[in-house]
Image (tube, rainbow, N blue to C red):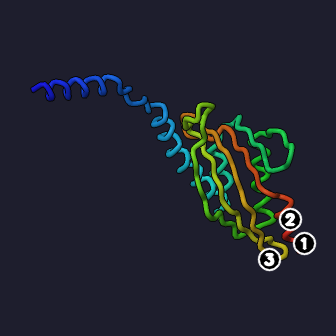
Amino acid sequence: MKNLIISMLVVMVVTSCTPPPPDTSAFDAGMEKYNKNAAIADNAYNLFISGDIDAMAAGYTDDAIWVGPGLGQDSLPLSAMVEGWRGWHAGFENFSFDNRQYYPGVDENFIPDGGVRVYGVWNFTQKETGKPVSVKYYAVSQYNDEGQQTASLEWFDQGGAFDQLEE
């Protein structure tokens, strides 16, 4: 009986020292937003591939900002982004965005904030010469509560893409 009482006391002391489980509600809410926005991002890339620039632009807020791949470039408005998309389609065709990998954006505490980071490889062909081009790509996108993009920051070797055309 003495051993039973001692065992129960030990269990009570150990379990009373165990901290409560962490609150994961902010993490879970951020992941829920991320999952929704990653699907929206994936669809936007598909719209670009198909050349439906107007539908793609409709997924952005009117005051969305874009930071393109040019080094040291300032943020630009949606109109500049749309002009850039149209420019790519004017000079190139047969777009594909391969090896897409999506990851959640995070806040300063590393909690998912609904943002989307994407890695992948863009492949396309120059219309004039028929030369293929392939570039690695990374982007960070932010979204509002309605699922519209508010910011798009892109990185890829734009100069390297054009260097491939001169080879």
First in sequence, mark 2 or 3: give its number: 3
Q: Are marks 2 and 3 in contact (CB under 8 Å)?
A: no
Quadrant placement of the C terminus: bottom right
Quadrant placement of the N terminus: top left
Q: Nearer the viewer, mark 1 or mark 3?
A: 1
> Amino acid under label 1?
Glu
Residue 119, given in percent of the width and then of the height, sits at 65, 55
Q: Residue at x 73, y 38 (%)?
A: 65
Q: Nearer the viewer, residue 151 or 11?
A: 11
When the figure is inspected, residue 110 is found, relative to residue 6, above or below; the finding is: below
Packing grade of label 1 (10 A; few <14, some 14-19, many >=20) is few
Secondary structure beneath dot 2 equals helix
Q: Nearer the viewer, mark 2 or mark 3?
A: 2
Secondary structure beneath dot 1 equals helix
Q: CA distance from mark 2 to mark 1?
A: 7 Å
When the figure is inspected, residue 54 is found, relative to residue 123, above or below; the finding is: above
> Amino acid under label 2?
Phe
First in sequence, mark 1 or 3: give its number: 3
Q: Nearer the viewer, residue 117 or 40?
A: 117
- Residue beneath disc 2: 162
- Residue beneath disc 1: 166
Q: Residue at x 84, y 76 (%)?
A: 129
Q: CA distance from mark 2 to mark 3?
A: 13 Å
Residue 72, given in percent of the width and then of the height, sits at 86, 43
Q: Are marks 2 and 1 in contact (CB under 8 Å)?
A: yes
Circle on res. 130: 3
Quarter location, residue 97: bottom right
Q: Is residue 110 left or right of residue 91?
A: left
Residue 124, given in percent of the width and then of the height, sits at 73, 68
